[in-house]
């Protein structure tokens, strides 16, 4: 019988391998996301089936070895073989080593594969929602249907065999095989949804479910590894294979939910938890509990609470019948009535142009010359760039173009929720695009310098009116609350904004220059005034001096006349000698006393160099 | 027995749900549904509500969004009538107006494929229409010269005409120029031009400053010169006045002209010898004439 079980294990392995390869091929052919997840699961089935088959072989070898040793002991007597050392049972040792080291190692590997596949497939599926080629859908559907059928037949047979023979090692592979049948069926349903075009995302959602399942398998393996450490070791109790998945077993035999749960609890706690009254009561009431849950779930869909600031659109069999305000509302259960809620009172906003990056938001200073984000330039008219009149329309010189960077926050409210929902597929995107168009059109017809200065305030009201008119024209059901020119400046790129700043700086420089000149003028005038004052005063002093001197001289002369009249020659000589002495006081005088000689007298009248100048000491001091 | 009854109820419930799923379908207000019988489109449902159908594969349901769908074409270079280049993108709102006609045109009724085809038509119309217009129709500091409305109408007419030819089942609800821009090289040139315009103001301010400063300084210099000139004139006048006043005393000297002249000569002598000078006298000049009759000594003259 053991041989038969081994054969079953080998068949399981072969079936899993063949269907894994076929399933992988079909997935590559169709591009099905669920198929990819199913292929991963089938690949794991191959690994589990192989390991369980290998373990069966080891157990079988150990069993045969033990049988042979027992027979040998009986035929030769026990004394010779009483002392049995480890080397006497190589097959048993191999099995024990395998269970001790390889099985936990394989379980860890399985855990990593499951977790990695769940994470990778989840990301991949979110990026490739519609990778299934509808053209190949029908063929893929048929093939996955066949895989499901084959796996179900082989899996069911194998599971029954495992239960009948109570073979713990056949169970893991069988469970994976049977669970693989249901997974292939789920994949086929996902593909069917796409093939019939009724549920174009069915493949994606099936893949998501399988990703979750792979994640659960990983968590289960992790828990199994952790709980294995604390499990009470009862002597003689046969251990379960660590890699056996109870979730896969449950998937394979959902009807055995309680049996699986009971076995798990019994195995973990080491006593019969499944025989307690609580467990039995839960088992008996399960259908009722299910019905109650279902009823509660349906009832919960008959009441809807609309939050303050929200409005709900009630669809009765898809037809929008009513707009619900804040508060509780009764409705028919899902799917007859469905309510879609929208935040209508909330002021929502978006920004046209650039949005400041986090660094700029944190900064307390905003400068034109420092880029706030990746700026978007808008084309704008620019009269000041016109370089002259030309009749040639192709002359680029007369195209008054300019570029401008803006950040325009637009705030809006939803006023008519039905229009908002049912007139456009993407109303917010539509509103943003309408606003952008109006801004582009407005700037294209504006003057750069005007919009930067005087026209700024008008621009906001004009833009708000224009955007509102456009929104009304397209029946968007929104009200434009605010449009602001938060930031508007010449482009930072190419140092254009810097040049604008330089103009202001130069203007300040001009004013400084004028003030400097005015200061110099004041100084010059003041100096001139003082100089004029001096000149006038000097002249005045001259006048006084000359007049006084003339007066004094006249007075002196008047007094001299009597003296002169009294002794003309004496007075004259006296005056002469007095003045001569005074006049020649500082003059160098040579008196030649010999007059009638023939001698030639030479006077050296050259000035002598001063003695101290000749002996001037030269130093190196600076 | 009780357990079986509950199981039966659950099973019946699930069966009812399954049958309802197979035989009914809902049409949302935002949708239009094309019902295909044995893959052939047989009916179009535009009104929202609950409808009956035969289960797949007899009848299948194809759902389409009947709301306005929007997309923006690529921000592409467009050659204008005045040989200028402009980057432009056009925003389009379109709607599936005839789902039955739309459905077979695009595999699976894919709106992505429809938008791809529509984009081709739109780009073609954009290029054709813009070729007839000048840059000044799209950017002009005089808003009355702009022709956005005209250009957009022309584009819409062109696209509608192209769609009508093949009956795509699509209606263009609106079309508008969403973005305009300049190619990178032209953008750099505009930057340079904008900077040149600002540099013009910089130079103007600088030269105005120089000129005004020079004017102020010149005016000040002139004013100073005027002041000094006035002062000098006044000073000359005052000096002259002094001279006149001094001359009024000259009559006194006429009482004895010899003495007056002698006084003047003495004054001139004093003034002329005021500087450093060397004088060589002989004994005949007074007072050195005193040396002539000195008694002789044994040691010298």
Image: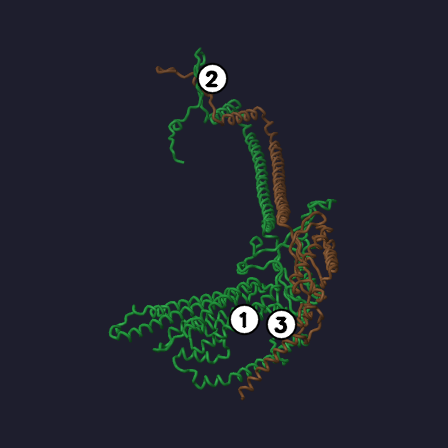
Q: Secondary structure at mark 3?
A: strand
Question: Which is closer to the viewer, label 2 or label 3?
Answer: 3
Q: What residue appears at the point 58 percent right and 66 percent down from the top-left corner? A: A140
Cα distance, mark 2 to mark 3? Answer: 138 Å
Q: Residues within 10 Å of mark 3 (few under 14, many from 20)?
A: some
Q: Residue furthest bottom?
A: B1
Q: Secondary structure at mark 1?
A: helix
Which part of the image, by quadrant, shows the N terminus of chain B? Answer: bottom right
Nearer the observer, A73 or B190: A73
| Residue A183: image location, x then y, percent | 53, 71
According to the picture, the residue beneath numbered tag 1 turns out to be A148
Q: Colour of chain B?
A: brown
Nearer the observer, B159 or A206: A206
Q: Are marks 2 and 3 in contact (CB under 8 Å)?
A: no
Question: Could you confirm whether marks 2 and 3 are on the same chain?
Answer: no
The answer to whether residue B144 is above or below residue A470 is above
Cα distance, mark 3 to mark 1? Answer: 43 Å
Question: Could you confirm whether marks 3 and 1 are on the same chain?
Answer: yes
Give the chain letter at badge 1. A
Mark carried by residue B284:
2
Q: Colour of chain A?
A: green
Mark carried by residue A342:
3
Q: Secondary structure at mark 2?
A: loop
């Amino acid at each position: 019988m053991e041989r038969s079980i081994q054969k079953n294990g080998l068949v399981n392995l072969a079936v899993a391998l063949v269907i894994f390869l076929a399933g992988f091929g079909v997935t590559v052919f169709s591009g099905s996301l669920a198929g990819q997840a199913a292929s991963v699961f089938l690949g794991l089935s191959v690994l589990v089936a192989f390991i369980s088959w290998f373990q069966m072989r080891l157990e079988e070898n150990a069993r045969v070895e033990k049988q042979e040793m027992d027979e040998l002991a009986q035929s030769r007597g026990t004394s010779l073989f009483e002392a049995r050392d480890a080397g006497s049972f190589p097959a048993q040792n191999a099995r024990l080593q395998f269970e001790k080291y390889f099985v936990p190692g394989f379980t860890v590997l399985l855990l990593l594969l499951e977790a990695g596949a769940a994470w990778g497939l989840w990301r991949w599926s979110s990026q490739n929602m519609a990778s299934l080629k509808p053209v190949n859908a029908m063929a893929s559907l048929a093939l996955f249907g066949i895989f499901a059928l084959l796996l179900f037949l082989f899996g069911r047979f194998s599971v029954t065999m495992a239960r009948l023979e109570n073979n713990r090692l056949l169970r893991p592979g069988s469970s994976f095989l049977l669970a693989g049948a249901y997974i292939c069926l789920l994949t086929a349903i996902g593909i069917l949804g796409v093939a019939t075009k009724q549920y174009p995302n069915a493949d994606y959602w099936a893949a998501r479910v399988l990703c979750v399942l792979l994640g659960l398998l990983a968590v289960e393996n992790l828990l199994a590894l952790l709980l294995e450490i604390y499990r009470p070791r009862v002597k003689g109790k046969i251990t379960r294979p660590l890699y056996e998945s109870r979730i896969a077993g449950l998937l394979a035999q959902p009807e055995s939910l309680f049996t699986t749960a009971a076995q798990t609890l019994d195995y973990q706690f080491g006593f019969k938890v499944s025989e307690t009254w609580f467990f039995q009561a839960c088992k008996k009431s399960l259908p009722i509990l299910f019905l109650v849950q279902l009823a509660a779930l349906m009832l919960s869909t008959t009441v809807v609470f609309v939050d303050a600031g929200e409005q709900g659109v009630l669809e009765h069999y898809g037809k929008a019948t009513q707009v619900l305000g804040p508060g509780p509302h009764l409705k028919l259960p899902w799917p007859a009535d469905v309510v879609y809620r929208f935040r209508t009172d909330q002021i929502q906003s978006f920004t046209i142009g650039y949005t400041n990056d986090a660094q700029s938001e944190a900064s307390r200073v905003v400068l034109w010359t420092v880029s706030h984000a990746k700026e978007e330039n808008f084309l704008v008219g620019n009269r000041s760039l016109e370089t002259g009149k030309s009749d040639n329309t192709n002359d680029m010189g007369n195209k008054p173009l300019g570029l401008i960077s803006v950040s325009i926050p637009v705030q809006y409210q939803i006023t008519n929720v039905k229009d908002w929902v049912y007139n456009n597929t993407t109303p917010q995107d539509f509103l943003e695009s309408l606003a952008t168009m109006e801004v582009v059109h407005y700037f294209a017809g504006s003057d750069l310098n005007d919009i930067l200065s005087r026209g700024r305030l008008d621009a906001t009201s004009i833009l708000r009116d224009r955007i509102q008119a456009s929104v009304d024209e397209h029946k968007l059901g929104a009200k434009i609350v605010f449009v602001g020119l938060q930031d508007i400046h010449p482009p930072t790129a190419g140092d254009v904004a810097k040049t604008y700043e330089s103009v202001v700086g130069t203007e300040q420089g001009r004013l400084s220059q004028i003030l400097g000149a005015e200061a110099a003028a004041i100084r010059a005038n003041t100096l001139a005034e003082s100089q004029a004052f001096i000149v006038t005063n000097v002249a005045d002093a001259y006048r006084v001096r000359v007049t006084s001197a003339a007066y004094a001289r006249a007075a002196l002369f008047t007094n001299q006349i009597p003296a002169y009249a009294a002794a003309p020659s004496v007075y004259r000589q006296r005056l002469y000698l007095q003045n001569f002495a005074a006049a020649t006081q500082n003059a160098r005088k040579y008196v030649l006393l010999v007059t009638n000689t023939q001698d030639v007298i030479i006077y050296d009248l050259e000035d002598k160099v001063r003695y101290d100048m000749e002996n001037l000491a030269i130093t190196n001091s600076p | 027995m009780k357990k079986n009854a509950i199981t039966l109820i659950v099973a019946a419930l699930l069966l009812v749900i399954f049958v309802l799923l197979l035989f009914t379908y809902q049409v949302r207000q935002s949708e239009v549904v094309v019902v295909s019988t044995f893959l052939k489109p047989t009916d179009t449902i535009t009104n929202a509500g609950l409808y009956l159908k035969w289960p797949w594969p007899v009848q299948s349901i194809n759902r389409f969004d009947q709301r306005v769908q929007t997309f923006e074409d690529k921000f592409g270079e467009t050659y204008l009538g005045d040989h200028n280049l402009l980057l432009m993108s056009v925003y389009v709102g379109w709607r599936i107006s005839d789902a039955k006609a739309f459905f077979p045109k695009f595999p699976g009724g894919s709106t992505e494929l429809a938008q791809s085809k529509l984009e081709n038509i739109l780009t073609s119309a954009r290029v054709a229409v813009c070729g007839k217009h000048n840059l000044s129709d799209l950017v002009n500091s005089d808003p009355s010269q702009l022709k956005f409305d005209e250009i957009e109408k022309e584009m819409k007419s062109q696209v509608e005409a192209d769609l009508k030819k093949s009956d795509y089942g699509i209606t263009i609800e609106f079309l508008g120029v969403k973005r305009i821009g300049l190619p990178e090289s032209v953008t750099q040139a505009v930057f340079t031009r904008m900077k040149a315009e600002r540099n013009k103001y910089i130079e103007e301010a600088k030269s105005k400053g120089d000129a005004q400063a020079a004017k102020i300084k010149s005016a000040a210099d002139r004013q100073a010169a005027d002041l000094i000139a006035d002062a000098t004139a006044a000073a000359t006048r005052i000096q002259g006045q002094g001279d006149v006043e001094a001359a009024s005393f000259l009559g006194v000297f006429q009482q004895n002209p010899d003495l007056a002249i002698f006084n003047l000569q003495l004054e001139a002598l004093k003034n002329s010898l005021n500087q450093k000078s060397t004088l060589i006298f002989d004994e005949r000049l007074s007072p050195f004439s005193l040396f002539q009759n000195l008694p002789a000594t044994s040691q010298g003259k």
